Image: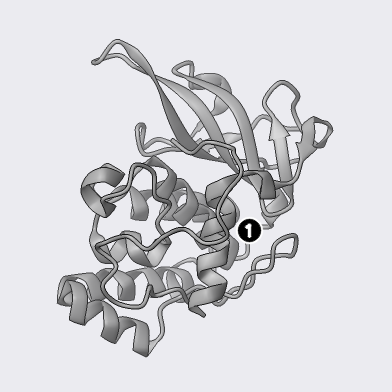
């Protein structure tokens, strides 16, 4: 789970990243997410060379989801489709997948490698819903403590929260529980902090009044965006 600390300018490359890392975004910190997040022909070619045909097929299905399947949906339907699409990806810890203790993968990396840690699910859903037209102020990537009943312990975790209105109770998109539920029905989760491109919020207060700063305080958010800009 990511920590908040002073960060290096650029995250060091993972040993698995043997090809240029596949970022196809235009993103500026503090500005709205643009729609151009989907893999182009060159990206698909690089992914096929590194990961094979099954990986490129997953990326093509993602592109179809955003460009065609979500086009006529209302926001609730978009949440359901996007949550279901990414939750199909197997859970794999960062040490196994990227040889890093804590690595935030881009959606392209996630789909190409066919493995994801909790933050990868939340980030991929966030970026995809933004590309599908869901306003950024309705989406927050949220740090939580999750109770794992089988292991009988709490674990750091990350989910995506959707706010129909600024001060409303959010809906939770999660990989641990595939059903989208209101936060009040997720007694296994204890939120601590949330963020998006516009800011950072404390879980102690609901809505805009809980804003405590800028997302630039989060090390891996910065390094992820830096890699996107650098790679582009």
Give how far across and how far down residue 134 sits, in percent.
Answer: 63, 58
Give how far across and how far down residue 89 sits, in percent.
Answer: 27, 52
Q: Quadrant of the N terminus?
A: top left
Q: Is residue 92 visible?
A: no
What residue did someone put label 1 on? 134
Q: Is residue 54 left or right of residue 22?
A: left
User: In the rendered picture of this protein, how many numbered marks are placed on residues?
Assistant: 1
Give how far across and how far down residue 227 sits, in percent.
Answer: 50, 67
Q: Secondary structure at mark 1?
A: loop
Where is 189 relative to 77, above or below?
A: above
Give how far across and how far down residue 113 sits, in percent.
Answer: 24, 61
Q: Residue at x 71, y 65 (%)?
A: 32
* Observer-nearest of 139 and 123: 123
Where is 176 relative to 133, above or below?
A: above
Q: Residue at x 44, y 18 (%)?
A: 188
Q: Residue at x 59, y 61 (%)?
A: 130
Quadrant position of residue 9 = bottom right
């Amino acid at each position: 789970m990511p920590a908040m600390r002073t960060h290096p300018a650029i995250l060091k490359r993972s040993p698995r990243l043997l090809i240029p890392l596949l970022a196809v975004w235009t993103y500026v910190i503090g500005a709205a997410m643009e729609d151009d997040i989907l893999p182009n022909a060159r990206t698909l070619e690089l992914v096929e060379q590194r990961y094979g045909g099954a990986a490129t097929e997953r990326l093509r299905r993602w592109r179809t989801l955003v460009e065609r399947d979500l086009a006529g949906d209302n926001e609730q339907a978009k949440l359901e489709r996007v949550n279901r699409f990414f939750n199909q990806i197997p859970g794999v810890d960062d040490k196994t997948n990227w040889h890093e203790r804590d690595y935030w993968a881009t959606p392209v990396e996630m789909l190409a490698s066919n493995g994801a840690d909790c933050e990868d699910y939340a980030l991929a859903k966030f970026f995809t819903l933004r590309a599908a037209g869901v306003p950024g102020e309705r989406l927050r990537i949220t740090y939580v403590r999750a109770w794992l009943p089988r292991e009988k312990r709490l674990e750091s975790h990350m989910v995506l929260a959707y706010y129909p209105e600024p001060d409303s109770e959010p809906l939770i998109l999660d990989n641990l529980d595939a059903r989208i539920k209101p936060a009040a029905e997720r007694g296994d989760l204890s939120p601590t902090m949330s963020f998006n491109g516009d800011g950072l919020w404390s879980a102690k207060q609901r809505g805009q009044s809980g804003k405590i700063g800028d997302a630039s305080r989060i090390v891996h958010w910065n390094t992820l965006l830096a890699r996107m800009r650098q790679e582009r």
